[in-house]
Amino acid sequence: MRSLTLASLLIFFSLLFALPSHASGQDPADEMGFGIAPVPVADPSVTANGYFIYKMESSASVTGSVMLKNPGSRPLTIQIAAVDAMTAQAGGSAFAASDATPEGVATWVKFAESSVTLPAGMQKPVGFTVSVPKSAKPGQYLTGISAYLVNVPPTAGADQGGNHLGASVTMQTRYVIGVQVDIEGAWRPSLEVDSAALVRQPSGPFIGVHMKNDGNIFLKPSGMIVMTDTAGMRVLDQPIKMGTFIPDTEVVYPVRWSGELASGTYQVQVSLDYDKDRKEIYEGQLEVKPANAPQDNGVAAQEWGTIGSGNEISAQSDPVAPAQAQAGPDMWLWVAAGIGMLLVAVVALLVLNLMKMRRLRELK
């Protein structure tokens, strides 16, 4: 049994390290790469930041286009879709999954084509229209144009014939270009911080600061979180600096607790500056219970990260501005793939071992 276990582990690690180099973050353009970029218009300010910024009114429409590029040596089919935007955990834009049903600003965007097949070395513009509904109120809005490959072949595999083992992992690369719509009128900046709670993560304890952009424009809050114990001693003093905070979204901003995590009651003060001279101050108490006791500080475990009413987040962009984003596989995919490979190896080796034992009995 020991030899069987060792053989299983050897096969597992050999399969894991046999994954192609671009699976670890290198550019896959040589095999299945593609590109997308905004097509400049007469007004250079629309695409000067690498994404689209439109100043519009209710009931108005505007047209634009993106350039799809295939620098590779084989034809590619690229899917285009509009996706809703939300705020990433520490600020910056995050976008819903490409196959999620649009519910917000993404419903304003329509494409001339939803799928484009490009021959090797070719490029093609794809037009779109942004139509602001009559009911839209003044403020800043964000959506994204998502481009991804369809029918992506497995990026890692092994021969499944004979006594060989096989496993595969599919990589899905996605690019998202932001589309910002500014509707003139009464712009109202507003930020609310309503709680702070202990959140235990595998990487260590964090203080989750629950905040909401309940105004109608983008914000970039920055400030401090200070925690003191019952004796008035500071146990936490950390800066907070967020990227773009999208209107009508909520986040639980993570602040790592690097000191000794002792049980007790702490005073928490969060002070954030935003929109030049505005300030939001939260003061409250945080109770830290023993690690094996349930925590109840107003932020549920499932609320860790981005909070939103709608689709899951699958991509995160530059944490400063709603520009172009690329999404690759999450770490859990590799863990699941590794476990799957190990199980396949163990089962296959058990079968082979039983067959060998049967043959030996027959020879006797």
Image (tube, grey):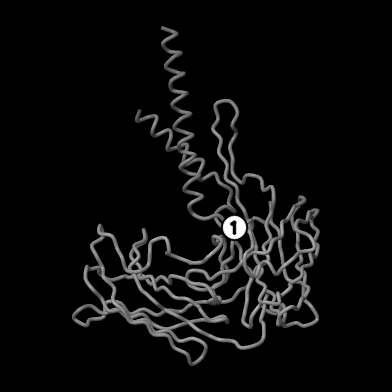
Question: Residue 72 location in percent, x, y?
Answer: 74, 55
- Residue drawn at 54 percent across, 32 percent down: 165
Query: To which quarter of the image does residue 36 belong?
Result: bottom right
Q: Residues within 10 Å of mark 1 (few under 14, many from 20)?
A: few
Residue at the image point whose x is 64% and y is 83% from the top: 138
Measured as percent of width and height from the top left, residue 274 is found at 49, 86
Q: Residue 267 location, x and y as percent?
A: 27, 79
Q: Farthest residue toward the top?
A: 364
**Residue at image coords 48%, 52%:** 332
Q: Which residue is mark 1?
A: 26
The quarter of the image holding the C terminus is top left
Residue 273's place in the image compared with 330, above or below, is below
Residue furthest bottom in the image: 277
Q: Could you say whether the residue bearing mark 1 is in a helix, strand or loop?
A: loop
Locate residue 54: give its quadrant: bottom right
The image quarter containing residue 265 is bottom left
Q: Amino acid at mark 1?
A: Gln
Compared with 113, 60 (above or below) is: below
In the picture, measured across the screen, residue 310 lies left or right of residue 352, that is right
| Farthest-out residue, left | 231
The image shows residue 109 at horizontal and vertical percentages of: 71, 68
Looking at the image, which is closer to me, 313 or 194? 194
Where is the N terminus found, in terms of image quarters? Answer: top left
Residue drawn at x 42%, y 85% as measured from the top left: 280
Q: How many marks?
A: 1
Q: Nearer the viewer, residue 297 or 69?
A: 297
Residue 352, relative to residue 198: is it above or below?
above
